[in-house]
Amino acid sequence: MLTDLNTRIAASPERTRIPERLETRFAATLAAGDGGIALFIALVLFGGQSNTPIAALVAAALICCAFWACGLYKRSYAVYPRDEVYYACTAVLAAALPVLLVVGGVGQISTGAICVMLIFTAIATSAWHAGLHLQRRTEPALPAARSSITPAAWHAREAPAYLLTKRVFDVTVALLALAATLPIMVAAAVAIVLESGRPVLFRQERVGRDGARFDVLKFRTMRRDAGSDWARPGDARITRTGGFLRRTSIDELPQLFNVLRGEMSIVGPRPEMAEFAERFARELPSYVQRHIVTPGITGWAQLYFKRNFRPEDVREVLPYDLFYVERASVVIDAALLLKTLVEVIFHRAV
């Protein structure tokens, strides 16, 4: 199916809009459905509390208005119809949690009851989201792609406002992610040492924003004598621990330190090895345009093309990267981060 998608992209006019942009009627229906279902379940479970109805109504209205203002009801980032379900579940949990916390705080409801309400809300509204998305599409949507970026986008990516919001988003997400994954990172380091010794981290020179060089950090997943050749699926050099780390994307977690140092972003084109970047720049005139933004841990191409790129894939991957550069924003970054988390949880990112 991936090959069919790439063929359709090559044969179709250049896509300049975000794919899966929902029509207003669909977005409004999703917002109304979220608010109505969350309100109904809140009243059913907590209706005996005197302040609960008002609190539930206010919380549901505020969260739906906030999501509408951010544009999250107006977009879907699923490439395949089945991904709509995963995306819907995660989006609904993000929307329902604030409602439940407000209602639970006002009504002094126990944590257990709030968890029950969260589950019911997620099930009900996820079915609503997925059903409505699937109703409006019968085949995979074309991932957006561009052959070059516009001068306006080039200027926008260098604007101080964009750089500031991007940096605040990156640092905030990186700190939260480090706090949440620190035990996992410690366990991974111990497992690597026990199986194949030190070093725990793998360092490799990559090309960043404006062509700057830096050392990307990853957990070592190959033998110490593996060399620096491009890794491929099923590579015999990958250790047993390394295979697990790759499948679960845990090997990417040390790059959070690259983010804090400003060398990488949470979302952006993947940083390329210097020798390959130089070669691609000679072969593809628009390749250097991807260096206008900071490279990322995840990104549009990783989600819409495939995770394990090969050097010969660069001509197909580049249009995805350039589309992201053209339309980059914190809202898109948040949505792509959300989808990345969903795919990692359901092991669809490998």
Image (cartoon, helix red, strand yellow):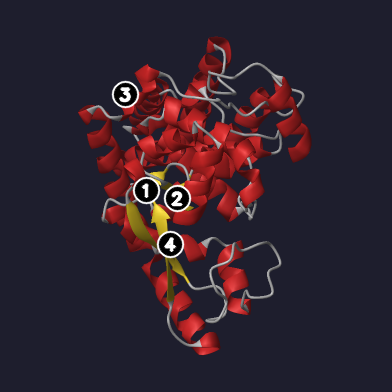
Residue depicted at 65% across the width and 25% down the height: 133
N-term mark: 1 or 4: 1
Residue flagged by tag 3: what amino acid is it?
Ala
* Residue of label 3: 156
- The residue beneath circle 4 is 253
The amino acid sitting under disc 1 is: Gly
Where disc 3 sits, the SS reads helix
Q: Nearer the viewer, mark 2 or mark 4?
A: 2
Between disc 1 and disc 4, the foreground one is 1
Name the residue that disc number 2 marks: 271
Indicate the amino acid at tag 2: Pro
How many numbered markers are drawn? 4
Residues at marks 1 and 4 touching, judged by CB atoms closer than 8 Å? no
Q: Secondary structure at mark 1?
A: loop
- Residue tagged by mark 1? 208
Q: Position of residue 211 (x, y in %)?
A: 35, 45
